[in-house]
Image: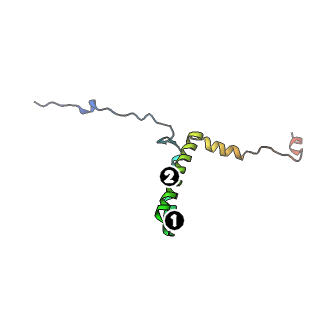
Amino acid sequence: MFIVVNYMSNSVYQINKGINQSIEFKGLKAQYIWYLGGGVVGLMILFAILYIIGIPSIFCVGFIGISGALLVFKIYKMSNQYGEYGMMKALAKKQIPKHIKVYSRKIFAEI
């Protein structure tokens, strides 16, 4: 006598509820993940350059450690302050002119 057990009915599947949401990793939102990654790569290159030119390694490690901590704090602050699209909106707002000067009335005369 054979007993057929259906293991599929006992399985628990996770449903992806994050559809159409921005990517987030450890509190960092959207583009700030890329900024932090680029900053870390830049710090590694800077460490290599400092080490190659002959600066003692303890100073290199200390400088890169302090710079890395400042980078992380600054990126997290920007992520919390601006959010996903806020920094792009703030930069776009700075490009809008405060005043528009028109030196002729020609534009108004055509109407």
Q: Viewer-proximal residue, 89 or 68?
A: 68
| Residue 70 visible to the viewer | yes
Camera-side mark, 2 or 1: 1
At 67% from the left and 45% from the top, the residue drawn is 92
Mark 2–mark 1 Cα distance, whole angstroms, equals 20 Å
The answer to whether 81 appears left or right of 102 in the picture is left
What x and y, as percent, mark residue 77?
A: 56, 43
Helix, strand or loop at label 1? It is: helix
| Residue 41 visible to the viewer | no
Q: How would you rate the neighbour count of disc 1 (Cα within 10 Å): few for under 14, some for 14-19, many for 20 or more?
A: some
Of mark 2 and mark 1, the one earlier in the sequence is 2
Residue type beneath disc 1? Leu
| Outermost residue to the left | 1
The answer to whether 11 appears left or right of 72 in the picture is left
Helix, strand or loop at label 2? It is: helix
At 49% from the left and 61% from the top, the residue drawn is 60
Residue 6 falls in which quadrant of the image? top left
At 88% from the left and 45% from the top, the residue drawn is 106
Q: How would you rate the neighbour count of disc 2 (Cα within 10 Å): few for under 14, some for 14-19, many for 20 or more?
A: few
Name the colour scheme: rainbow
Circle 2 sits on which residue?
37
Position of the C terminus, as image quadrant, is: top right
| Outermost residue to the bottom | 53
Q: Viewer-proximal residue, 92 or 80?
A: 80
Q: Viewer-proximal residue, 27 or 77?
A: 77
Circle 1 sits on which residue?
50
The answer to whether 40 appears left or right of 16 in the picture is right
What x and y, as percent, mark residue 27?
A: 49, 40
Residue type beneath disc 2? Gly
Residue 31 vs 48, above or below: the answer is above
Asked whether disc 2 touches disc 1, contact meaning CB atoms under 8 Å apart, the reply is: no
